[in-house]
Amino acid sequence: MNATKPMIATVAIVLGTTTFAGEASADVGPWKPFPTGVTKTYDPKVVCPFGLHAEVIQDDELGREFTDESGNVVAVEIVGSLVFRFTNMATGKSVVRDANGHGWTFNHPDKSQTLTCVGPFAAASREGQHPPNFPTGYYILSGVTVIEIPANGPYSIAYTAPIENICETLASP
């Protein structure tokens, strides 16, 4: 895995560039509806000690694709409103959170991906599928988030504070 990919991805977000390191200029597609939110109920102990329902209550995201000279999608930029209601299925307690950060997905030739987001971002870290620095839980990450997803093997995540573990929020009285 190339350790410079997260930095390149972050710089691309900040500068809004359409050229990716070591690649030819990308063609930019039009903005179009690109909903990414998924309503899902997790059984107890999958992401929280209790059952968790994550409900999309607004998803007005837009996306645009960046393609290389062969027409392969090399990046996707996503902006817009994404709002969830999270509910503790045991107590009924719920909270509403924005997850409407500015996001990018970079597709690499080796089939790995780099996901980056600036601003609120929602991420489920499932039991048995999380990296060591990101324990099981459902999180709202509000700074800069970079996730490296290799073609094979475990993913890694780097983020800046603040971070909220929705499981802890909903477990408290």
Image (cartoon, rainbow, N blue to C red):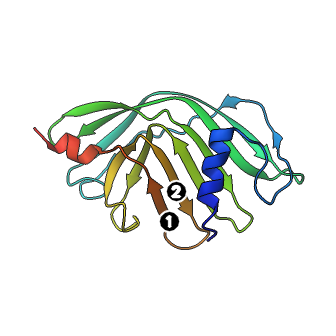
Judge the density around disc 1: few (<14), some (14-19), many (≥20) Cα neighbours within 10 Å.
some
Give coordinates of residue 125: x percent, y percent.
38, 56
The amino acid marked with disc number 2 is Ile
Using residue 151 as the reference point, say whether residue 164 is left or right of it.
left
Labelled pair 2, 1 in contact (Cβ < 8 Å): yes
The secondary element bearing badge 1 is classed as loop
Q: Which mark is drawn over residue 147?
A: 2
Q: Residue at x 62, y 69 (%)?
A: 151
Q: Is residue 159 above or below residue 122?
A: below
Q: Nearer the viewer, residue 149 or 128?
A: 149
Give coordinates of residue 80: x percent, y percent.
56, 28
Disc 1 target residue:
155
Q: Residue at x 21, y 47 (%)?
A: 168
Q: Is residue 135 above or below residue 81?
A: below
Q: Nearer the viewer, residue 122 or 160?
A: 160
Q: Is residue 60 above or below residue 107?
A: above
Q: Nearer the viewer, residue 47 or 15?
A: 15
Judge the density around disc 2: few (<14), some (14-19), many (≥20) Cα neighbours within 10 Å.
some
The secondary element bearing badge 2 is classed as strand
Give coordinates of residue 100: x percent, y percent.
49, 32
